[in-house]
């Protein structure tokens, strides 16, 4: 309320840790709690190595508040957290701007220019923070550089120099650099106001920024700001190699400003230029084997390729109907610039299909979760089973086909068959699943082609196949191709980076051992005891273990000596065996249920047919009796007079009522006769079996 707003600070609820006793479900929403008291303690103890660490923990407080109160729809606390986060961002940016300007603002972790021991502040900070573990690496300015900047701002200046504040030639924090670039474009529009090709370009850019290497939270590689801003020492070398600098934040701001790009082709060209510049700048370092240059070179190579795939898919509405294809150029055989044409899209699609559809699928073990490729295959299957598409997919789910289906279709296919094949881990790659799904609708189009344009069931099945194939299946395949191709190529690059890091560590370890040996040798020479080399003869002995020859025995041994020593199976093996048994039992129950349903249906249909046949026979018999009585009555009326008709009328009426009952009685008598004949035949058969049993003295009765 108004009284609380005017009397209590806004951050009161964030001062202390959340009481888990009062909110027991808090750990379910928040994995890393944080509060202002903890931030203050870590600041005073010198835990933060960089200003970004302090900023991260402070923002984490308000993010935790939104994560916990968001599902509970606690709007006041969510609004308070957003307000505090916005205020902190403004204050923090102002403090960092003052520091870069040389004013010497108070920031977390700032020290005096010199220590009591006479050491510079940068060295003392490095020694104090060397043993402090960091949660995750962040690309930012180091603590020593922050302290050096503060020392320069507070150190006495020689006479004759200007006293006006002077900006230092120091690296700028990433978030400050991004904010500066955006502020240089003050006419930026909200993304929701974009339309036409600009809206599609924004969607393409947002999808590109979701890549784990470019994520705004913790990017692994920096493409969002110019290189000289983060690394001022590279300004001259970068300007010599790169004639047209570009970064992702500048491209985004130009798009939102409006009027700076006249078409989608120009925007895509600038985005591709970011990664092309990175390739050019890091090529020499990659050839020399520098670890950072190699990492940026490999990452830029993949991101340039991924940008081409993504732009040609998301901007498909603006592709020129042209077969023009941009071929790879340069030493690296890469397409660094391309036109938005259908020819380039076809080439990009072939590249993605080669990667995603032909790569062997990683199969999970029985009872384990799906692997990435199996999960993507499952998503592709489920994309066809949305509730809104149930009326279209009705014809293609179950493997139920018309009697003449095999005359037109050689390989029937249904959705349930594909799903069961995936669950049984029988697909070797995603391409086999895609072929089966396309086969479902191609079979439907081939079989129901004669009903095209009609209101029959065949016509509806044809229209449903066209809709599901073009509107649902193919767009889902396009999304799957992008996701799987990007993931596989990203994993390859990261594996190469990891192997390179391992090799670098091994070389460093070898160098350390070599230096230690050299120091030890020099120390020994200085002391006058030169180590003499000793010659050692090494003999290699090869041990061959032969299996004992088992002698033949004159009796069968009930066990084998090679069996295990009665070791109990592990818990994992036991659980796995139980899962296999459970799944087999469930499959047997399913088969038994299907068999019982089919057999009971057959019995019921036969009983129903028999009942209908009896009713029909009785109806026919009654109709025949009525017709006979009517005919007899007509003949007798024509031959007899009025007196005779009156005298014989009751008798004829009695006779006319007899045929109906006589026919029914006759049918009952026939059934009784048949039953008696069957009983007599069964009795004779039993007597023969009994006589044969007595003669042969058999112990088993073969007749049930």
Image (cartoon, helix red, strand yellow):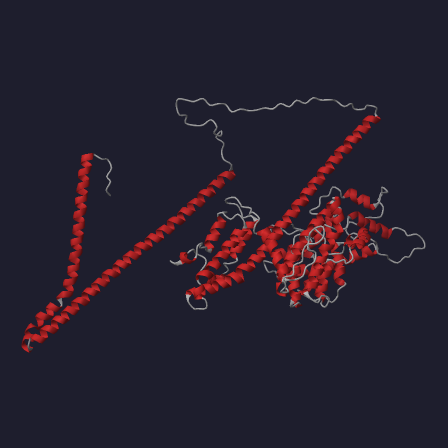
Residue in the foreground of this view, choosing between 6 and 539: 539
Left or right relative to 245: residue 371: left
Left or right relative to 167: residue 26: left
Say which residue appears at 67% left-offset and 56% top-offset: 327
Answer with the quarter of the image where residue 119 lies. Answer: top right
Position above or below: 353 against 504: below
Say which residue appears at 26% left-offset and 58% top-offset: 610
Quarter of the rendering occupied by the C terminus: top left
Question: Could you tell me residue 443's position as x and y percent?
Answer: 46, 58
Say which residue appears at 66% left-offset and 68% top-offset: 193
Say which residue appears at 17% left-offset and 41% top-offset: 688
Answer with the quarter of the image where residue 314 lies. Answer: bottom right
Position above or below: 68 against 641: above
Number of callouts in the render? 0
Question: Could you tell me residue 259's position as x and y percent?
Answer: 72, 68
Residue in the foreground of this view, choosing between 119 and 461: 461
Residue in the foreground of this view, choosing between 440 and 75: 440
Q: Is residue 10 visible?
A: no
Left or right relative to 226: residue 347: left
Position above or below: 193 against 110: below
């Amino acid at each position: 309320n108004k009284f609380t707003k005017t009397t209590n600070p806004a951050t009161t609820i964030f001062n202390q840790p959340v009481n888990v006793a009062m909110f027991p479900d808090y750990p379910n929403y928040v994995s890393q709690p944080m509060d202002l008291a903890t931030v203050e303690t870590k600041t005073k103890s010198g835990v933060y190595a960089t200003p970004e660490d302090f900023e991260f923990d402070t923002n984490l407080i308000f993010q935790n508040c939104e994560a916990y109160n968001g599902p509970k729809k606690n709007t006041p606390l969510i609004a308070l957290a957003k307000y505090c986060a916005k205020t902190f961002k403004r204050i923090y940016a102002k403090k960092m701007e003052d520091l870069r300007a040389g004013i010497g603002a108070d920031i977390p972790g700032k020290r005096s220019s010199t220590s009591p021991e006479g050491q510079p502040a940068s060295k003392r900070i490095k020694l104090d923070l060397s043993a402090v573990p960091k949660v995750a690496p962040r690309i930012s300015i180091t603590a020593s550089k922050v302290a050096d900047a503060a020392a320069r701002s507070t150190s006495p200046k020689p006479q004759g120099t200007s006293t006006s504040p002077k900006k230092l030639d120091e690296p700028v924090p990433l978030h400050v650099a991004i904010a500066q670039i955006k502020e240089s474009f003050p006419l930026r529009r909200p993304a929701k106001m974009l339309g036409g090709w600009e809206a599609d370009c924004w969607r393409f850019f947002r999808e590109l920024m979701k890549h784990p290497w470019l994520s705004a939270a913790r990017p692994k590689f920096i493409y969002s700001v110019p290189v000289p801003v983060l690394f001022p020492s590279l300004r001259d070398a970068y300007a010599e190699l790169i004639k047209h600098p570009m970064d992702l934040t500048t491209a985004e701001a130009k798009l939102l400003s409006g009027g700076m790009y006249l078409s989608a082709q120009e925007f895509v060209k600038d985005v591709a230029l970011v990664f092309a510049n990175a390739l050019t700048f890091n090529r020499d370092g990659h050839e020399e084997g520098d670890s950072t240059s190699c990492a940026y070179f490999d990452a830029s190579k993949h991101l340039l390729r991924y940008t081409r795939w993504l732009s040609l898919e998301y901007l498909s509405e603006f592709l020129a109907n042209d077969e023009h294809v941009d071929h790879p150029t340069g030493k690296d055989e890469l397409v660094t610039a391309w036109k938005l044409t259908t020819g380039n899209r076809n080439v990009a699609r072939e590249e993605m299909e080669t990667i995603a559809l032909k790569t062997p699928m990683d199969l999970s073990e029985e009872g384990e979760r799906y692997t990435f490729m199996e999960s993507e295959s499952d998503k592709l299957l489920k994309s066809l089973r949305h509730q809104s598409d149930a009326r279209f997919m009705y014809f293609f789910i179950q493997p139920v086909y018309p009697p003449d289906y095999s005359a037109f279709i050689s390989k029937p296919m249904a959705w349930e068959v594909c799903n069961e094949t995936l669950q049984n881990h029988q697909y070797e790659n995603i391409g086999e699943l895609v072929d089966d799904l396309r086969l479902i609708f191609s079979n439907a189009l081939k079989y129901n082609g004669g009903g095209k344009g009609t209101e029959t069931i065949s016509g509806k099945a044809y229209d449903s196949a066209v809709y599901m194939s073009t509107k649902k299946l193919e767009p889902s395949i396009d999304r799957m191709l992008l996701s799987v191709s990007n993931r596989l190529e990203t994993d390859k690059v990261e594996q190469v980076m990891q192997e390179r890091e391992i090799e670098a560590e091994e070389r460093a370890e070898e160098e350390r051992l070599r230096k230690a040996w050299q120091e030890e040798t020099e120390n020994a020479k200085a002391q006058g005891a030169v180590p003499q080399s000793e010659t050692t003869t090494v003999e290699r002995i090869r041990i061959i273990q032969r299996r004992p020859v088992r002698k033949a025995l004159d009796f069968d041994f009930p066990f084998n000596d090679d069996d295990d020593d009665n070791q109990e199976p592990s818990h994992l093996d036991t659980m796995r065996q139980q899962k296999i048994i459970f799944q087999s039992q469930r499959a047997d129950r399913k088969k038994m249920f299907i068999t019982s349903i089919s057999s009971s249906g057959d019995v019921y249909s036969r009983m129903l047919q028999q009942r209908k046949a009896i009713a029909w026979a009785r109806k026919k018999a009654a109709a025949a009796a009525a017709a006979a009585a009517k005919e007899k009555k007509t003949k007798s009326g024509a031959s007899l007079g009025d007196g005779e008709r009156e005298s014989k009328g009751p008798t004829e009426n009695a006779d006319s009522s007899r045929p109906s009952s006589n026919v029914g009685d006759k049918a009952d008598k026939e059934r009784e006769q048949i039953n008696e004949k069957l009983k007599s035949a069964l009795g004779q058969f039993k007597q023969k079996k009994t006589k044969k049993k007595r003669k042969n003295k058999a112990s088993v009765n073969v007749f049930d």
